[in-house]
Image (tube, helix red, strand yellow):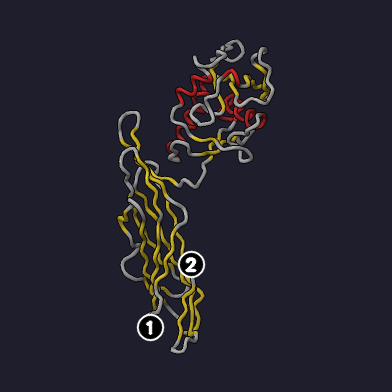
Amino acid sequence: MKFTLRGEHQEVLGSAILYVSSSATLNPRSGRWDEELLVEATQFSDRVTSVNVAADVTCTSKCTTVQSSPWTGSRTLTDGQVASGIVKYSEIPATGSEDRTKVGYSLKITQAGTNPTKPTVTWSNPREIRCDSATTASGNISTGCALPSVTPELELPLSTYGAAAATYTWAQWNLPDKWGLFSGKPLTRALDGDARRERTCGNRSSVPFVAKPDIVPDDSCDEFPFASTQEGGTDGGRCAEIVALLENGKWEIYEADPARPVTKTEPCVRGHVPQGVNSLAGTAYSNLIQNQRLVNKDPFRMTVPDA
């Protein structure tokens, strides 16, 4: 933003440019967060040799500012100097609810010995912050905040997740909806994963899953889209059923049920995957939910970067 000093007849006596930046890291496990504000003064000209800068923040809805000013009073800045400080926020929604807030900023710029006509500039951050307070499975209350406008990405490399990742990436690139890819549809969280998994891998599937321990040691049923997504939970009898095997350093995909040939038009895949990597991939998804504070129907992307 530009500060301009004008004379009695509105003639320009000098000016300065101020750059403002801020950065904050929301806490997925707390309703409190800090934000750092920086103001740099530069490009001073003529009779403007210094400016006095004061800053303040506000937030809407149920959010409160624990510390609304990054520094006390005004800071005097000359060319090239920077003022910086921390502001603090708190947002604790009622249990079982969520709240959205926007942060507003105010910057007051003056010069000693002059009478300002419009010293204060205000603006707001266009990104809403969402905080929620949820009851955990253990009965505790968990509060956290996130930016719902940002879609997180879950990375599941083959080098770590093996047959599970091979199954997912095969589904992404061969089935119509390309769930999780940036060229396809995002996945969205679901809260009833256990019930959805029963429809794909459990007793509610029209075609029971039959393990193949002679081919896949410690064989288990793995599904994609994940059961704990809105896109998952399809009847397992409608899924493409495959086995991913590592042969000569390359993952090869085979049909697992001759009675149901793979057509690549299926809405889901049911893979024969060792239990270890199946569970490991499930843990990675659970960590994404917690670390990104995904609530019901929140979208996310999923990629296998080394596929």
Which circle, 1 or 2, is nearer the viewer?
A: 1
Q: Residue placed farthest to the top in the image?
A: 214
Q: Position of residue 46 (x, y in %)?
A: 49, 84
- Residue drawn where x is 68% and y is 17% of the image: 261
Q: CA distance from mark 1 to mark 2?
A: 22 Å
Closer-to-camera residue (265/82): 265
The image's mark for residue 36 is none
Q: Is residue 206 above or below residue 108?
A: above
Please report the residue visible at 55 percent of the width from the left and 15 percent of the height from the top: 206
Give the residue type at disc 2: Tyr
Q: Position of residue 212 (x, y in %)?
A: 59, 12
Residue depicted at 32% across the width and 56% down the height: 65
Looking at the rendered structure, the number of numbered marks drawn on it comes to 2
Question: Mark 1 — residue?
Answer: 114
Where disc 1 sits, the SS reads: loop
Rendered view: 199 above or below 292: above
Q: Residue furthest bottom?
A: 9
Specify the quadrant that holds the C terminus.
Answer: top right
Query: Image check: 113 left or right of 258?
Result: left
How many residues crowd around disc 1 within 10 Å: few (fewer than 14), some, or many (20 or more)? few
Q: Is residue 14 placed above or below 58 in the rendered structure? A: below
Q: For the point 67% across and 18% down, which residue is it?
A: 255
Q: Which amino acid lies under the numbered mark 1 shown in the image of this protein?
A: Thr
Give the residue at mark 2. Answer: 19
Picture coordinates of residue 219 (x, y %)? 55, 15
On the image, which quarter does residue 30 sit in? top left
Can you say whether 225 is above or below 19 in the image? above
Mark 2, secondary structure of its residue: strand
- Viewed as shown, does residue 267 lie left or right of 41? right
| Mark before the other along the chain sequence, 1 or 2 | 2
Image position, residue 155 (x, y; %): 55, 36
